[in-house]
Image (tube, grey):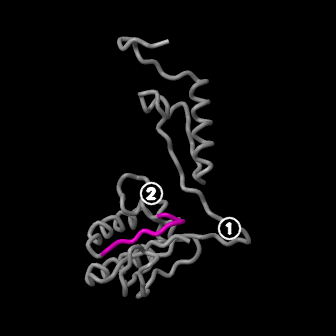
């Protein structure tokens, strides 16, 4: 049955909400992302489509080994057609163990204020050139304000690498997922 264009839009029923929420959770679960969908989110979207809040999964590979993101300052010594073919020499790094960097980045992930840091991925690499350091430094300042005092030193170490990278155009910062 077709709904006439002049018909008023109604909020989805609880049955539709529950069904859609289930399908969304199942679809996202296969990609390892946990999803929270509520009826309130359905109403907030206003168009009958859900506003979905996806959270990055905590990754634990067993035996207590939690993986995270490493922050590395690197010099590309040989260019290639992609990151795997390039030859890269590590110049400096942020000394943080386990999932500390990932936990710190989670303080601003998906906040809408740090689009560059939002791209850092626990299972992939984010490579930033010296041309991108102004934005990275601004986002790291936002991060510094968002983290607890115990984590400020890690953010300051990232800022130090960003300053070095900005001063030397041949350097790159890698947010390297495990």
In terms of secondary structure, where does tag 1 sit?
Answer: loop
Using the image, determine if residue 117 lies above or below residue 98: above
59 lies left or right of 96: right
Q: Position of residue 63 (x, y in %)?
A: 74, 72
Q: Measured along the vertical axis of the image, is residue 80 above or below residue 147?
A: below
Q: Residue at x 49, y 31 (%)?
A: 42
Foreground mark, 1 or 2?
1
Residue beneath the point at 41% across and 73% down? 82
- Distance from disc 1 to disc 2, alpha carbons, whole Å, reads 22 Å
Q: In which image quadrant can residue 147 be found? A: bottom left
Q: Is residue 125 magenta?
A: yes
Label 2 crowd bin: few (<14), some (14–19), many (20+), radius 10 Å: many
Crowd rating for badge 1 (residues with CA inside 10 Å; few <14, some 14–19, many 20+): few
Residue 121, labelled with which disc?
none
Secondary structure of residue under mark 2: loop
Q: Whole-percent x and y of residue 115?
A: 36, 58
| Residue sitting nearer the eye, 148 or 32 | 32
Q: Which residues are magenta?
A: 121-129
* Residue identifier under label 1: 61
What residue is disc 2 on? 109
């Amino acid at each position: 049955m077709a709904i006439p264009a002049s018909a008023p839009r109604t909020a989805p029923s609880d049955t539709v909400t529950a069904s859609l929420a289930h399908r969304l959770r199942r679809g996202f679960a296969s990609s390892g992302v946990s999803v929270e969908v509520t009826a309130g989110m359905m109403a907030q979207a206003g168009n009958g489509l859900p506003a979905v809040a996806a959270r990055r999964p905590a990754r634990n590979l067993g035996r207590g080994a939690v993986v995270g993101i490493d922050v590395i300052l690197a010099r590309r010594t040989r260019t290639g057609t992609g990151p795997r073919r390039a030859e890269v020499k590590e110049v400096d790094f942020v000394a943080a163990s386990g999932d500390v960097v990932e936990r710190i980045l989670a303080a601003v992930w998906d906040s809408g204020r740090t689009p560059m840091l939002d791209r850092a991925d626990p299972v992939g690499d984010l490579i930033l050139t010296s041309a991108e350091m102004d934005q990275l430094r601004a986002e790291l300042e936002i991060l510094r304000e968002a983290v607890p005092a115990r984590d400020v030193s890690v953010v300051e170490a990232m800022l130090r690498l960003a300053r070095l990278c900005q001063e030397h155009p041949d350097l790159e910062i890698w947010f390297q997922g495990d």
